[in-house]
Amino acid sequence: MSVRILVYNDYAQMSAAAARHIASCVDARPDIVLGLATGSTPLGMYAELAELHRREGLDFSGVTTFNLDEYCGLDDDDPRSYQRFMWEHLFAHVNLDRAQTHVPRGATRDPEAECIRYEEMIRAAGGIDLQVLGIGMNGHIGFNEPGSAPNSRTRVVRLADQTVQVNRAKTAAEELPAFALSMGIGTIMDAREIILLANGDAKAGIIRQAVQGPVTCDIPASLLQRHPDVTVFLDRPAARLLELS
């Protein structure tokens, strides 16, 4: 299956369009199950969703969320944790039921059991209706680094050195864990719909490989080409190498 590609003039327009898409899905299905991503790319989208809630009453009260990943060993209130990230950038600004927001428990003493629990929770919720993704410079989705198996499930992963370095630079953290809990590619591909966001000139090369290159485990995001319902939201710099009709 070929992915749908939507290109916008700049990051702000891309973020607003992605937020509007999510909002329309929430309006159509108030009990929707959303899969959420962290990182710098979705920040604008989350700000737009918070604004839609404030300005237009977008209602998250029936929504359930599952985040893609979390660093191993971090407490929920650690400023480097993705739990803290989500509360600062989205959860605290909309009317989500806290009990319906789920992030892997990075501080667990039994990471393997936590991964099994997380998969079971997703299944119990009926699966993910709409999964939001970013893309790493090496093509990772979630923390599924190059070489991840297409049928992988939520598991403990060792992060590529490049991933740790990039994320450290973005967060200004002196140190980040080298391991994380991450939904697997199989978990992501089970979502009924997927949207991927990317912006900036630096992402242009990996975006071309992911959406118009060969499908290969060496570029995990390229596996999305096999999903029946994927939309990629890009700004013009990120789309500059694509062949668009």
Image: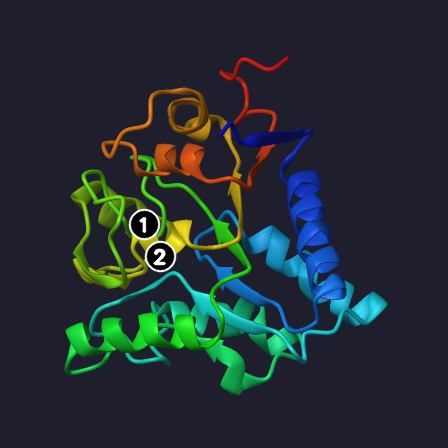
Residue tagged 1: 185
Question: In the rendered image, which quarter is residue 96 located in?
Answer: bottom right
> In the rendered structure, which amino acid carries the disc numbered 2?
Thr
Q: Which of the numbered marks, if any, corresponds to residue 118?
A: none
Expressed as whole percent of the image width and height from the top left, the position of residue 6 reads 64, 31
Mark 2: which secondary structure?
A: helix
Q: Is residue 40 above or below residue 72?
A: above
Q: CA distance from mark 2 to mark 1?
A: 5 Å
Q: Is residue 233 left or right of residue 2?
A: right
For the image, the number of numbered tags is 2
Please say if 131 is above or below 58: above
Q: Are marks 2 and 1 in contact (CB under 8 Å)?
A: yes
Q: Nearer the viewer, residue 147 or 126?
A: 126
- Please tell me which residue lies in front, 106 or 221: 221
Q: Is there any visible trace of residue 29 in the rendered image?
A: yes
Label 1 Cα crowd, 10 Å radius (few <14 / some 14-19 / many 20+)? many
What colouring does the structure picture have? Answer: rainbow
* Residue at horizontal 23 percent and vertical 79 percent from the top: 107
Which residue occupies 77% across, 69% down? 58
Q: Which residue is mark 2?
A: 187
Residue at point 39% right, 53% down?
188
Residue 36 is situated, as x and y percent measured from the top left of the image, at 49, 60
Query: Horizontal and vertical percent for residue 243?
Result: 54, 13
How far from the left and from the top, in percent, is residue 170?
38, 50
The answer to whether one can see residue 74 in this image is: no
Residue farthest to the right, as pictured? 56
Left or right of residue 161: residue 68: right
Q: Please, what secondary structure does the residue beneath circle 1 have?
A: helix
Q: Quadrant of the C terminus?
A: top right
Say if 242 sits above or below 156 in the image.
above
